[in-house]
Image (cartoon, rainbow, N blue to C red):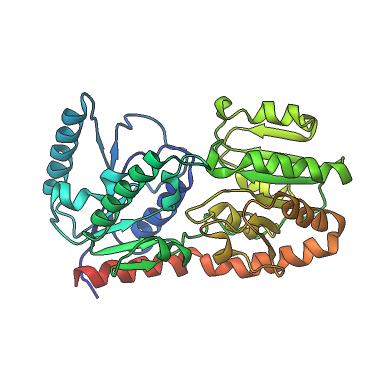
Amino acid sequence: MMSRKIKLLYITNQICGSGGLERVLSVKASYLAEKLNYQIHIITLNQGDTPLFYDFSNQLIYHDLTVKGSKLNYFLTYRKGLKKIINNVKPDIISVCDDGLKGLLLPVIIGKPCPMVYERHVSKNIEVKSDEISLLQKIKLKITFALMNFGAKSYDTFVVLTKGNLNEWPLENIQVISNPLSFYPNESAELKNKKAIAVGKHCRQKGFDRLLQSWKLVLSKFPDWDLEIYGTIDKLEGLSELAKSLNIDKNVHFFPPVKNIGEKYKDASIYIMSSRYEGFGMVLTEAMSYGVPCVSFDCPYGPSDIISNGIDGYLVPNGDINTLSQRVMELIDDIALRQNMGTKAKKNVMRFSHEAIVLQWDILFKKLIC
């Protein structure tokens, strides 16, 4: 057992947003500082004075780098700034939470002043920007993946969120540590409101275009049910227009991110995940913590690690819009079924508690520096 505080330095981009990475870091870093007596430093990039969306412990120490200019100047300034902070902090361990290529290559860019861990929060599929890719795009992807694999091998430990993610990385230094629960409320949803919910920013990854097509099928049988979607709204995604063209806009409601998302889960009766791919699917664990049964595409990767199909929710073949709507309609049609699944969901999701997950990080960090 160490007699002094472990200095842990996180390197990321920004922590002011409303995404999953920011939420996880707020939970994990705060727990390590307040409960496990770590000294936590966080380096952000071009964040400035932007207020934080989530609650971070006041025990954390922040460092922000301002980087701009040409690509070369950007790179050199970033590298110099990182090395200066690292030399001042003298961390025992560095953990990188940056899903971009620069994050993967940091051990090469700055050297390895101490053991370094990489936390991968998304699937490699994030690099695939459309359902159909050209030969040139395939070549570019092959080169990108080769660089990603090269960088990943430079870390002491490479952490992914799900068992499925293990298949994406040809590594020996890899292990799985799932995301911790953001919260675990005493209360549960009553599951009586005629309302389904989805959470995520408007982008191809979240597959809300597929969700709207599925919801149209649901409304053909249950026209008095509503769908609420919470997340950063991007008008270029055209989801409002799609809802209108499907003639379902009166039953679909788009909302920006809210801090009290727990209240929205509590008010819903079904959670639907339509993602094309995921890093984990933390929204599933959040909904389940309120006893809300989930219906999700079995996308790579995450949902199959979280949902026990037919027990505490449903997994549907990825992209099967008809089956997605059928599973949702089964839950709508049978309140006893959704209450039974919701009860099991709330119980089963406890395996992602703060204590269980952050303890795994504590063990990893101490193993690397001892």
Total count of labels: 0
Residue at 52 percent across and 54 percent down: it is 182
Above or below for 18 versus 298? above
Q: Examine the rendered structure and indicate whether residue 334 appears above or below residue 99.
A: below
Location of residue 269 in the rendering, given as x and y in whole percent from the top left corner: 76, 52
From the viewer's perspective, tell me whether residue 98 is left or right of residue 22.
left
The C terminus lies in which quarter of the figure? bottom left
Q: Residue at x 33, y 32 (%)?
A: 47
When the figure is inspected, residue 93 is found, relative to residue 225, above or below; the finding is: below
Give the residue drawn at x 86%, y 60%.
334
Image quadrant holding the N terminus, namely bottom left
Residue 338 appears left or right of 100: right
Q: Is residue 114 visible?
A: yes
Measuring from the top left, give residue 357's x and y in whole percent: 44, 66
| Residue 347 image position (x, y, % from top left) | 64, 69
Quadrant of the image occupied by residue 294:
bottom right
| Of the pair 109 and 337, the residue shown nearer to us | 109
In this view, the residue in front, 37 or 183, is: 183
Kindly tell me whether residue 10 is visible in this rendering: no
12 shown above or below 237? below
Front in this rendered view, residue 260 or 314? 314
Q: Would you identify the image quadrant in which residue 52 lies? A: top left
Q: Residue at x 36, y 68 (%)?
A: 175
Q: Is residue 343 left or right of residue 171?
A: right
Q: Is residue 9 left or right of residue 216?
A: left
Image spot of residue 76 (x, y percent) = 14, 34
